[in-house]
Image (cartoon, rainbow, N blue to C red):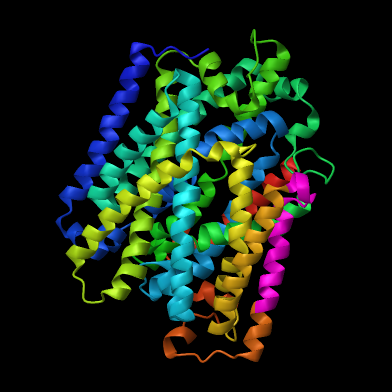
Amino acid sequence: MHLSIAPADLVVIIVYLIGIVGIGCWAGMRRRRGAAGEGYFLAGKSLTWPIIGLALFSTNISTIHLVSLAQEGYDNGLAYGNFEWMAAFTLIALSLFFAPFYIRSNVATLPDFLEKRYNRWCRDWLAIVSIVSAIFIHIGFSLYTGATVLRGLFGVDENISIIVVALLTGLYTIIGGLLAVVLTESIQAVILLIGAICITAMAYAQIGGWSGLAQSVDPVMLTILRSAEDPSHLPWYSVFLGYPVIGLWYWCADQTIVQRVLGAKDENHARVGPLFAGFIKILPVFIFVLPGLLCLGLVNQGHFDSSPATSADTYAFLISHVLPVGLRGLVVAALLAALMSTVSGALNSTATLFSYDIYKRWNPGISDRSLVVMGRWVTFFAMIAAIIWSRYIGRFESIFQGISAIICYIAPPITAVFVWGIFWKRASSVAALITLWIGAALGFTVFLLDWFKESTGWNIPFLMTTFYLFLICSAILFAVSLIAPHRHTAESRALVWNNPMDALRGPAWRGIGNYKFLSCALLITVIFLYIKFA
């Protein structure tokens, strides 16, 4: 049964849509220098740490997280909260080790950075992979998940939802570029947090607090680290071995995410922004995963006359059974905020990658104005491709596990090339390219084995798969580097840490804003949480 849209809810949703599209278009047209390439694609290198942190969080959190983490909470408790808390460690790595080189090398894209460290072929390969991942992972999955939720709540046809949301998001992204994207993402992050907190707080109050929850569910559901026999298929060792591989790719080497850091005002803002995002990433366990577990507890307590038809309907079920009129509209607006922020960020990154790493290579004399025009056309066609692909995503059993598995097959060679590239000066360009090629082939092979696992018998947890692939890719890179040594230029030599401790010797703000202090505080906080919920 679909949720009826009360007038108050409808007003909230319409005001949100008009407001966010209007703000995005206004931001793009107001900044006249946005017509220049750097202004359009990197917001004129003007982003400060609060904007960067909120934009990182907002781009990361999509309807996939709101819906699928609630689903996982209903099915498996807090186990999939590992994907949120473990992100803090890789955001620390971004702040300390990667962001300084990105800012000092003055790159517009991460493939550009890879060329400066290795060679042009590595840049081309990463550009293509990044464009494909942005369209098929960030945009496609988000559009499909959002359409599924709107269909479950209001009975809106999936095709209509996908097309309308994609067109509205594409409109302000095409007009405003990165400045419009990060400004709207900052607003959307706030709306997203308010909506998620509302639904969590009300469900938490109804169940009788933590003691009421603990009495209503299996105690193991309240723990975050699980054994190999646990039905979540997320054993604790796979989290600590496998997540760093996908986390380093996603947070430190994926253009869609890192582009916010590339637009930083200076190195300190580039360092502190990710740490701010790391602190915010503590919240999703409590406001995205926990609601699913609260829903299970409320069902077990007999609060409702029914239960979700499937676990995938958990979040929609909570909205319709827990929230009053008015707040339902706010939470739906939060769902749209999560969807639109991820889509807009990925569209802008796709345009940046194609314009700088592919088009400008073949037409080096192109003007900034023509480059921006090309970027806008790429945004449009990327949006169309994502709309078409999103209709096929329903084949996955679980959306969150589906997207996580695909990332696990893409990440290992890229993570190996980036990590060893900045920490090992002997990592060579020939080795990097061979690693990217062989790693991609191995990842695709494993994807097919997993996709047809009923026939192949493949049953290795996806996080352990990514760890094994990373070891193989690292071994290839080391072996080939020793056979075909790298010939450093002055530029490439400057992009390798002589000693990891050198990362702590850069310029830093005084007081609480010091990135070294914030890194330690974030590290201690997350370790404490793991001990508390282990």
Q: Residue at x 38, y 38 (%)?
A: 188
In the image, taking residue 378 as reference, residue 149 lies left or right, namely right
Image position, residue 507 (x, y; %): 43, 72
Query: Which stretch appears magenta?
Result: 453-476
Q: Is residue 507 visible?
A: no
Magenta-drawn stretch contains 250: no
In the foreground, 92 or 232: 232
Most frequent secondary structure within the magenta stretch: helix
In the foreground, 311 or 299: 311
Image position, residue 3 (x, y; %): 47, 14
In the image, taking residue 333 as reference, residue 225 lies left or right, namely right
In the image, taking residue 364 as reference, residue 241 lies left or right, namely right
Residue farthest front in this picture? 455
Q: Is residue 128 above or below residue 327?
A: below
Q: Is residue 153 above or below residue 306?
A: below
Image position, residue 287 (x, y; %): 56, 33
Q: Residue at x 75, y 38 (%)?
A: 223
Image position, residue 138 (x, y; %): 47, 48
Report the quarter where the C terminus lies: top right
